[in-house]
Amino acid sequence: MQLLEYAIRGIPTGCVFALLAVGLVLTYKTSGVFNLAYAGQAYVSAIVYYELRKELEWPLVAAGVVSILVVAPLIGLLLERVLFRYLRSAGSMAKLVTSLGLLIAIPEIAKLVFGSETRKNPPPLWWVRRTDEWLWPEGATFVLDAGQVATIVSTLVVVVGLVILFRSTNLGLRMRAVVESPRLAELSGVDSERVSMAAWMLSSVLAGLAGVLIAPLFASLNPFDLFTLLVAALAATVFGGLSSIPLTFVGGILLGVLQAVLAGTLPTDSVLTNGLRPSLPFVVLFLLLLFRPGLRSTRELVDPLATVDAPPPPPVVRARPQWVATSARVFGVVVSLVALLVSWFALDQYWLGLAISGLVLSVTMMSLIVVVGMGGMLSLCQAALAAIGAFALAQVVEASGAPVVVGLVVGILVAAAVGALLAVPVVRLDGVYLALATLAFALMFQSIFVPLSWVSGGAVPISVPRPVIGPLDLSDDRYFLVFVVVCVIATALVVIRLREGTTGRFLQALQTSDVAAASIGIDGPRARVVAFTIAAGIAGFGGGLAAIDLGQASYEASFPYIIGLVWVALLVSAGARSIQAAVLSGLFFFLFPALLDKLFAFPGNWVETNPDAPSWVASIADTIQPTWAQSVAFILFGIGAITYAKHPEGSIEAQTTASVNALVRRVEARNAAREPARVGGPGTGGTTP
Amino acid sequence: MTVPVLELDHVDAAYGPFRALFDVSLRVDPGEAVALVGANGAGKSTIARVASGLLPPTSGSVLVDGADLSGQAPFRYARAGIAHAPEGRSTFASLTVTENLELAFRSARPKRDVAADLTEAFTLFPKLGERREQLAGTLSGGEQRMLALARVLVLRPRLLVADELSLGLAPIVTADVYRVLGRVRDAGTALLVVEQHLDHALALADRVVVLQQGEVTFDGPPEQLGDLSTTVLLPAGSPSRADPTDAAATDAAATDGGAT
């Protein structure tokens, strides 16, 4: 009986999971995009509702209609028109990376538009100002508040509505046809463009509804809380096999009930309870991904008419003449040396510190090169693996007083071991599912392990001293810079060794075609496990260096999972295969926001020092806020990831290829002019069908 | 002079940087059956795609019943009466047999009685009726072709563009498919049949168009094809193609024009 009561208490939470999960399934079914940006869209509607209802004190219906039925579909329409219509026949990986970029960019754009101040106590979608002002039924032992009633009612309406949409309406049928193949649907007389727009608008309305309904669960409005909840709801999505709306609903309710029952029955103070309760959805998601029958065999349906498009650029870097490769290498070394000398002599403490942090991050970025660029696995848990390296280092150094450098090695080994354990089950999953499993792992790590004192040291981060190597005391930033540069070069050599070696070749073959690789005897899972493990070790190294750089192993400061997502977006947009992209994106991550900060602060400072400045300058100074820097930087990082679909090789690589090709052409033209006897070189283009 | 149901007027087409069609002109009159033959990579499927709007021409125009539809979305072609069964899979694998049919019937203009259409389709193809709740992706290759053709037989479009319907089918099933194509023609639908099996195509066709390396090199009745029929399917650069004495004089000139 007691158990039943706990179970009933879980239903409102279950409805929250179900609502989010059902919306994701709808988006996936109607657009083929596993839309992580769903949380961002939800956040925008929640902000609009907050501003209208709480700041401007609009009536409930008006505020609800504008935020959910006007703003949300417009966002959906915009995303479809400017972005996803061009990705209809792109692979699921490109779509996932695009949605990752949007997830990062959308909330920051919303902050720019609506202001970035904290929004406390979001109002419920009910005729009261606070959720607990209306309880039902009054005076009972178990009551529902306004927010919960609104959520339950909305969830039921949405689920029934969607089931009807897909079972028995023309639009539902068309949406399913268009997502399989927009062109085949056109041949049946369906206006795919319109159907696709309708699908995005509908899914965006659901995202907006979810955002407005769920916002009051949190003390203040924050996109990352929404995203974490969304990842929790993914368990229900996977339960429904990414296609069945009723099953997804059942999965959401089950998840809520299970959570409530566990909360009621487990002893309140045990480690198990404290860790398991918040992390239950992530554990369930992880296990479902690994063990749900049928999930692994659901192949992506390929659009039979995809060949109408011109073929995408090949992801593999084309071979270049030897002289180009050599001179590029020399150029790179010269530029790096000059940069190092400038940093040593010219940079002040602030910029030097940022440059060091950037170089340290580039080590972790190189782990992404191994796992994402070479392995073709979109791992979203490299930040967690870096944190493991940092924690191992800190614990070893604190417990045994071992030298920090020994701690670094221990960090690498521990992270690699964890990575290997994780890789064995995970590498068997396909693209999107692998990304979700690693994301689930990152959140499990955050909610179960980070709070434990034997992992992170508890609430106060363990401090890590800078090592002293021989006569060099690395607490001097300039010596530390040199140490970090040596570490970066060492890591780069490892990555290059791996890339040019057997495993690298295997991975390249696997990226081109799993089946073809298997048919010549390549053990795909084994090569992927090796890559994942080495990447984990590199991430652990990067994490350890970050801890040394900061002086402590702090999860909050260095490794939150959401920052890890930004790293992925940034690296993928710079180029997921090249060492220089890793180094540049690491530096960029720290230096770019700082530069923007200086830029945005400049007008204000200038007006302060020049009191007689003209009024229009002052007004510019008033509008431009230094707080914009972070937002603008993140928006650009996010937009960078969106370009992945067009340039899978990365923007840096695309630029380099273009300019190198131009250079090679010019040199060849000059050589040809010198030897007029040899007429008619290689033909340019043919009539390949 | 009758208005052709489909007319390609000096059409060029390309996939990105790769040009696939060079100045192709082609017409299909109402009720006429035209066979489009040529070697691998000659551009047959490209013509089919241009004819149904999937691939907009880079220059030239596509007229359906005299109306210029160049550059319009493919669904406009479908509603104007062009049905296209593309090469390979031409049904929705994730929809059931009934849903596949319903999608086409409901999207047709002017509006139709969908229930009556479904009954008709299942009467014409009892096998599909037995599998009406089955996902189309689980049907055999021949059944999938029948599903695509059932749609066409019921809707009676102006023109069916049939792209390599025999691809991957057993000879006996191919014969079945061509029997149904004959019924489609008898129902008044014009045909543009892309085919590598010459005997099937020529038996059905009123007219043959030969395509070589993206250019039309022969357009006339099957009887006039003559010895060219032994060489049209050979890819560019084959030994027998290089020897023009094999072919009839007039046709050989056309062949050379295509090969250079």
Image (cartoon, coloured by chain):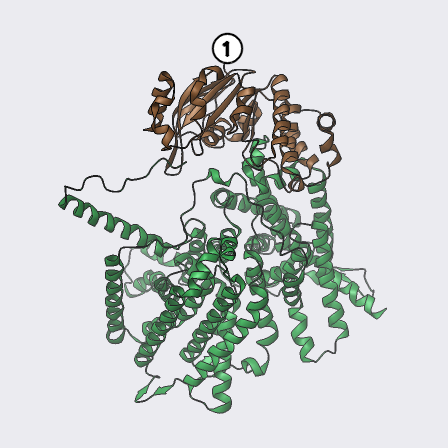
Instruction: From this view, report whether residue B66 is shown above or below residue A278.
Output: above
Residue B97, percent from left and from top: 69, 36
Considering every residue shown, the one lying at the far bottom of the view is A401
Quick one: quadrant of the N terminus of chain A?
Answer: bottom right
Instruction: From this view, report whether residue A265 is shown above or below residue A312.
Output: below
Instruction: From this view, report whether residue A573 is shown above or below residue A445.
Output: above
The chain to which mark 1 is attached is: B
Look at the numbered disc 1 and give the secondary structure of its residue.
loop
- Given residues B10 and A351, the one toward you in this image is B10
Residue A236, percent from left and from top: 67, 58
Q: Does residue B1 appear anywhere in the picture? A: yes
Q: Chain B is drawn in which colour?
A: brown
- Given residues A16 and A656, the one toward you in this image is A656
Quick one: quadrant of the C terminus of chain A?
Answer: top left
Say whether residue B30 is left or right of residue A216.
left
Q: Does residue A388 appear anywhere in the picture? A: no
Q: In which quarter of the image is residue A494?
A: bottom left
Q: In which quarter of the image is residue A656?
A: bottom left
Considering every residue shown, the one lying at the far top of the view is B1
Q: List the residue tagged with mark 1.
A: B2
- Amino acid carrying mark 1 in the image: Thr
Q: Chain A is drawn in which colour?
A: green
Instruction: From this view, report whether residue B212 is shown above or below residue A278.
Output: above
Q: In which quarter of the image is residue A484?
A: bottom left
Residue A534, percent from left and from top: 46, 71
Query: Few, some or many C-alpha atoms within 10 Å of disc 1 (few <14, some 14-19, many ≥20)?
Result: few
Residue A133, percent from left and from top: 72, 61
